[in-house]
Amino acid sequence: RKEVEQDPGPFNVPEGATVAFNCTYSNSASQSFFWYRQDCRKEPKLLMSVYSSGNEDGRFTAQLNRASQYISLLIRDSKLSDSATYLCVVNALKANTGNQFYFGTGTSLTVIP
Amino acid sequence: EAQVTQNPRYLITVTGKKLTVTCSQNMNHEYMSWYRQDPGLGLRQIYYSMNVEVTDKGDVPEGYKVSRKEKRNFPLILESPSPNQTSLYFCASNSWGARSPLHFGNGTRLTVT
């Protein structure tokens, strides 16, 4: 079983729509959670860190459910510029290896005019 | 500006010709790592370093070497590149602590013919 699993999509949504992505993780000792945005062939960029019960940043809301071991990303009022791949990243800090990051394969979003 | 700098951005080489991809960060981060990204496989860790002179293998270390002689630099060395190392490579860094997100360099697209 993969450490982090995401639905690869693609998600094609009209402008203005609300879209949600889910990500599940297998390591119950995972301590921190992040959503990254990656544009085609460019580096992943941090979109949001996800703490405790979740957080909101403008049109973006991230939530964490530790009991079910999943995190979600909600994008409201989608813009054309939101078209990208969204990566779920999970970190488990270990004494002997330090930070151990696990990556989903990404969910592709295309916002259509 | 806080950043991770990789060079070169693009590299085309031939099988067996040794190459080095440089990575430097200016955030005084302890932790640095290298990833490769291939279609359908997501980001896979090649090597990581928890601090100066401390390096360890990630998930796909075969064919790669690294060194960490200074805190800011973490070069990736391919002693004898092969076509299966054609990929998009990212260097990343973060500070010690589970809540610290990864900061990625802008990537190196390597083609080995």
Image (tube, coloured by chain):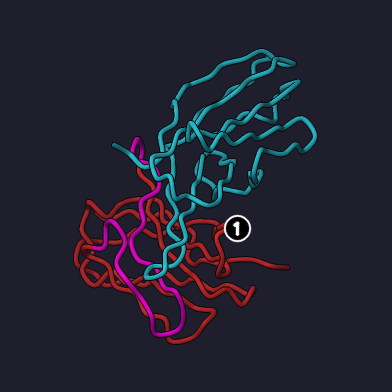
Chain colours: A cyan, B red
Please provide percent x and percent y for residue A3. 36, 42
Which secondary structure type mostly characterizes the magenta part of the structure?
A: strand
From the viewer's side, name the closer residue of A2 and B6.
Answer: A2
Give yes or no for residue B45 being in the magenta stretch: yes
Q: Residue at x 27, y 67 (%)?
A: B64
**Tally of numbered tags:** 1
From the viewer's side, name the closer residue of B93 and A94.
Answer: A94
Which portion, as a residue range, is magenta?
Answer: B39-61
**On the rendered structure, is A82 left or right of A58?**
left
Q: Residue at x 41, y 69 (%)?
A: A95
Q: Residue at x 48, y 31 (%)?
A: A68
Residue that numbered label 1 is attached to:
B99
Q: Quadrant of residue A83?
A: top right
From the viewer's side, name the closer residue of B98 and B105.
Answer: B98
Please provide percent x and percent y for residue A111. 64, 20
Q: Residue at x 50, y 34 (%)?
A: A67
Q: Residue furthest right?
A: A58
Please provide percent x and percent y for residue B89. 41, 56
Give yes or no for residue B8 being in the magenta stretch: no
